[in-house]
Amino acid sequence: MQRFFWPVVLLAAGTYGLLISWGAMTLHQAAGGLPSFDIRFSAYTADQARAYIEALGETGRAFYLGPVRILDTIFPLSFTLALVLGYFRWIGRERSGIRAALVLVALVYLVCDMWENSGVAAMLLDPQAIDPAMVKQIHLVTLAKWFYALFALAAWLWLGLANWRKRG
């Protein structure tokens, strides 16, 4: 299983690179500079969500629902797998409780990211159905996604660095 570690890490990094450099930049331009739902940290209203979708236009919406959605599905899956493989690589059986807790954090991140993607797709497909409760829920899931992703990544980087120091 560990032989897949570096290929999965590279897949996650490459997918994220494409998602940011191509996906996010294209959406940013299509929406006239407005930030995409996935990176909005401040709250937004249902009217602002509809305005963003309107600014995207049909081409931008198709791009969001097509290539961006594909990349935004591959990335969280590969990122979560890279996290989990790293935790198993760097945390021994004697600390399996810590490992299990970190795996759980990574899985909660994955659920939040997929939930967010589903909500964003629903808004893009039917902007007239957007209501304040839907927007609030998707925004809170976005915040949770970022919290769990950053926590899981910080632990992963710390463990990787600690392991590298032990070897060196």
Image: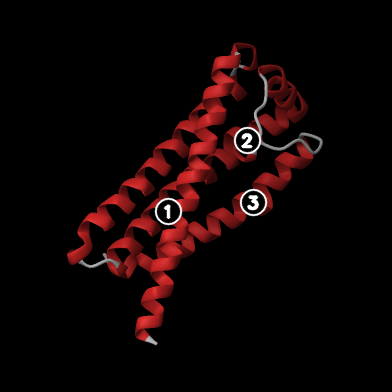
- 36 relative to 5, above or below: above
User: Residue flagged by tag 1: what amino acid is it?
Assistant: Ala
Viewer-closest of 102 and 75: 102
The mark found on residue 48 in the picture is: none
Which quarter of the figure has residue 65?
Answer: top right
Residue 143: % across, % down = 54, 37
Residue 46: % across, % down = 66, 18
Q: Which residue is mark 1?
A: 152
CA distance separating discs 1 and 3 = 20 Å
User: Residue flagged by tag 3: what amino acid is it?
Assistant: Ile
Q: Are marks 1 and 3 in contact (CB under 8 Å)?
A: no
Viewer-closest of 12 and 99: 99
Q: Which residue is mark 2?
A: 64
Q: Nearer the viewer, mark 1 or mark 3?
A: 1
Viewer-closest of 147 and 62: 147
* Labels in figure, total: 3
Q: Which residue is mark 3?
A: 20
Which quarter of the figure has residue 120?
Answer: top right
CA distance separating discs 2 and 3 = 13 Å
- 135 relative to 157, above or below: above
- What residue do we see at 29% from left, 50% from top? 101
Q: Nearer the viewer, mark 2 or mark 1?
A: 1
CA distance separating discs 2 and 1 = 26 Å
